[in-house]
Image (cartoon, helix red, strand yellow):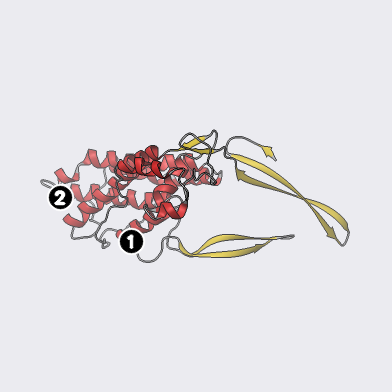
Amino acid sequence: VYDSGPVAKAEVRCELTQTPSGTEWSYRVLLKPANEFMNREGQKISTSRNWAVWLPDYLSRYDPDPLRYYLTVNAPETRDTDFAWGDFLRRNNDELVATWGNLAHRALTFAYRNFEGRVPEPGELNATDRAVLEKVEGAFEPIGELIGRCSFKAALTEIMALAQEGNRYLNETSPWLAIKEDRKAAATSIYVALRVIDSLKILFCPFLPFSSQKLHEVLGYEGDLLGRLEIRTFREEHKAHQALCYEGGEGAWAPSQLPAGQALRKPQPLFKRLDEAIVEEEMARLGRPA
């Protein structure tokens, strides 16, 4: 195995193949994520000592996307990292709830209450409107490249930064104030915000599929964002392998085309704020017999 850097390892496989003309070697170069180690509250993970996070146990109390998010942004891509419940709580409350969830919920709630439950018809977009749309729409290619290089932490960090941009845009345009004197201006900023959210839904989807599907439905779309999950067998010249694939999904790796007038469903928060008491509760479970 050749270590080509902190992001990926190149594994060279040599295969001996019998052909009509004789014996041939074939070489296959595969890129794989190259991670270090994740510890648990400062100690090495040990299943025998129950010093671990057990997925069925976790899912009995929490939703899956916060764990997917935390494991990605805290991934040991270049150095050892630590799974700490205090940090998990902070990431959930400050980033998923207060940043991404807040952007989606306040824009959708405002639209649902003030524009008859539909995506409002915008007026003419100004420079501020166009700038935020262009920034989000222009992120699909570079973020897709990061994912393709297995730079998942960097990709997710970039997407969350775009959610922060969306919040700044809403704070700057303040549609809740504008609607008192200029309903069309409020409609325009909410329309732009919903377009941003619709695009972010796609960007977040590889990491947060459950909340992205929930948002997909609230935005008024039908069907599955990713589609039906299937296990397929792919046959190559000398071997076959299986892969998880999605079939028939509505989602595409492309910016939002959310139409004005589309009916919205009643918004619900994407994520749950966690109480600080869970840190002590989860720490008390560590080391006990499973």
Left or right of 268, for residue 25:
right
Depth check: 3 or 93 in front? 93
Closer to us: mark 2 or mark 1? Answer: 1
**Residue 179 can be seen in this image:** yes
Tell me which amino acid carries mark 1. Glu
- Sequence-wise, the earlier of marks 2 and 1 is 2
Depth check: 228 or 260 in front? 228
Residue lying farthest right?
Answer: 22
Left or right of 9, for residue 218:
left
Tell me which amino acid carries mark 2. Arg
Depth check: 18 or 170 in front? 18
Q: Position of residue 228 (x, y in %)?
A: 47, 66
Residue at image point 64% right, 41% down: 9
Residue lying farthest left?
Answer: 181
Q: Position of residue 34 (x, y in %)?
A: 59, 40
Residue at image point 84% right, 59% down: 18
Secondary structure, mark 2, is: helix
State if disc 1 and disc 2 touch (CB < 8 Å).
Answer: no
Q: Position of residue 115 (x, y in %)?
A: 18, 57
Secondary structure, mark 1, is: helix
- What is the number of the mark on residue 183? 2
Q: Is residue 6 above or below residue 184?
A: above
Residue at image point 23% right, 39% down: 171
Q: Is residue 184 above or below residue 38?
A: below
Tell me the residue that label 1 is attached to: 217
Residue at image point 56% right, 43% down: 149
Residue neighbourhood size for the residue with mark 2, other residues' Cα within 10 Å, grouped as few (<14), some (14–19), many (≥20): some
